[in-house]
């Protein structure tokens, strides 16, 4: 096994000089002596240029403002006074009046079962009332959130309930899957998704105006543990056209679109690329990242886990970091996905910083 050799100059850059505020995972976002800011480094990646070092997911500031009822009732609000991950909450109605209940064993919330708001998708207009966003205190909330922002990292603002997940919250899972393939129900889905895109366009505009949104993290799970919830053809017909509209809403405002989509969705990779998203964060552990990267790695910035665990020796971790760079990192077009939700070695980001600095120097 190769001996660990680290460049002393890069080691100086890696030294911690402080901590950024991270409302999602406290004490995980150090300030280091990097040659360029994490914001500029990320922007180089997203503009199709070469970064100076490997971007890391936690380099961005996550924001899921409490102003949006969905974030609070789903126990996923991250701002100036964040809800600690998994902390017990009361649940309650979301923006559309759907009732969510907090489930202590999972540390999150789910829709109260057996009483879907939409019982007939062809007549959803009779039961769904869209929120009046003018009633929210955008300026006040934006001012409070500004207190935790800094100009040298990207603001990553979340829409926690996307299109597929929103429809599931309205109809329940089984009826949603039927509606995607039943010829007599599809038109109702298209009308609803069209209207949701208009609503999200307004919401995205306010995110840009009041939260200086750089990245829109659009959460829309499309898979299960074993595979996609629907076929690629169904995704192309029923979801991709509307994800492209969300992308357009972002891009015309100078925002990049990140799709967070849990489940084993490697079969849907081509459809996701066709949807014009800038970043895709596939779920760790269950997806074939080599397949995804070989399929769409030249079209979408992929957020990829390190493949390490905390019980590895430093030498084995370093070998994994070299393998990561060889498979994914050497071209400067991926993001390292490490969070406390999945296992990783405490030095893997350090090793990948050194390896990527060396590899990307050729692009300078």
Image: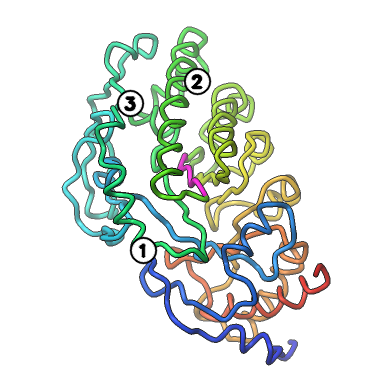
Rounded to the nearest whole Å, what is the CA distance between mark 2 and mark 3? 14 Å
Q: Earlier in the sequence, mark 2 or mark 1?
A: 1
Return the residue found at the far top. Answer: 184
Q: Secondary structure at mark 1?
A: loop
Residue under the image location 55 percent in, 58 percent down: 285
Viewer-nearest of discs 2 and 1: 1
Q: Secondary structure at mark 3?
A: helix
Residue under the image location 36 percent in, 58 percent down: 146
Q: Which residue is mark 2?
A: 180
Please give the range of residues in magenta: 215-220
Q: Where's residue 301, x and y in %?
A: 66, 52
Q: Secondary structure at mark 2?
A: helix
Q: Nearer the viewer, residue 346 or 45?
A: 45
Principal secondary structure, stretch drawn in magenta: strand
Q: Locate residue 268 relative to residue 239 in the image: left or right.
A: right
Q: Is residue 295 above or below residue 184?
A: below
Q: Earlier in the sequence, mark 2 or mark 3?
A: 3
Q: Where's residue 174, x and y in %?
A: 39, 26
Rounded to the nearest whole Å, what is the CA distance between mark 2 and mark 1? 41 Å
Q: Where's residue 223, x and y in %?
A: 51, 40
Q: Which residue is mark 3?
A: 170
Q: Earlier in the sequence, mark 1 or mark 3?
A: 1
Q: Locate residue 247 relative to residue 1 in the image: left or right.
A: left
Q: Tell me the quadrant of the picture where the N terminus can be found.
A: bottom right
Q: Nearer the viewer, residue 42 or 74?
A: 42
Q: Tell me the quadrant of the picture where the C terminus can be found.
A: bottom right
Viewer-nearest of discs 2 and 3: 3
Circle 1 Cα neighbour tier, 10 Å, few/some/many (<14 / 14–19 / ≥20): some
Rounded to the nearest whole Å, what is the CA distance between mark 1 and mark 3? 34 Å
Q: Which residue is mark 1?
A: 148
- Specify the quadrant of the image occupied by residue 2: bottom right
């Amino acid at each position: 096994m190769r001996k660990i050799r680290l460049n002393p100059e890069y080691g100086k850059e890696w030294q911690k000089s402080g901590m950024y505020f991270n409302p999602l995972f406290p004490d995980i976002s150090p300030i280091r002596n990097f040659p360029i800011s994490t914001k500029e480094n990320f922007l180089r990646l997203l503009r199709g240029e070469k970064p100076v070092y490997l971007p890391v997911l936690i380099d961005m500031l996550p924001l899921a403002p409490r102003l949006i009822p969905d974030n609070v009732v789903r126990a996923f609000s991250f701002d100036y006074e964040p809800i600690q991950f998994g902390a017990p909450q009361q649940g309650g109605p979301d923006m559309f009046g759907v009732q969510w209940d907090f489930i202590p064993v999972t540390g999150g919330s789910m829709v109260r079962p057996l009483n879907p708001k939409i019982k007939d998708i062809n007549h959803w207009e009779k039961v769904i009332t869209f929120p009046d966003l003018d009633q929210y205190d955008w300026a006040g909330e934006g001012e409070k959130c500004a207190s935790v922002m800094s100009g040298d990292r990207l603001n990553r603002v979340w829409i926690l309930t996307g299109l597929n997940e929103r429809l599931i919250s309205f109809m329940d899972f089984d009826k949603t899957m039927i509606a995607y393939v039943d010829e007599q129900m599809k038109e109702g889905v298209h009308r609803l998704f069209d209207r949701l895109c208009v609503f999200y366009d307004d919401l995205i505009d306010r995110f840009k105006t009041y939260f200086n949104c750089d990245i829109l993290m659009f959460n829309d799970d499309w898979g299960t543990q074993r595979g996609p919830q629907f076929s690629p053809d169904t995704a192309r017909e029923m979801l991709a056209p509307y994800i492209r509209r969300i992308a357009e809403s972002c891009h015309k405002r100078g925002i990049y679109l990140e799709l967070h989509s849990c489940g084993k969705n490697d079969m849907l990779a081509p459809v996701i690329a066709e949807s014009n998203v800038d970043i895709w964060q596939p779920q760790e552990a269950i997806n074939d990242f080599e397949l995804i990267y070989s399929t769409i790695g030249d079209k979408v910035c992929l957020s990829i886990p390190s493949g390490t665990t905390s019980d590895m020796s430093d030498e084995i971790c370093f070998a994994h970091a070299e393998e990561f760079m060889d498979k994914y990192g050497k071209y400067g077009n991926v993001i390292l996905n490490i969070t406390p939700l999945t296992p990783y070695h405490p030095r893997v980001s350090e090793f990948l910083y050194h390896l990527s600095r060396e590899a990307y120097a050729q692009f300078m």
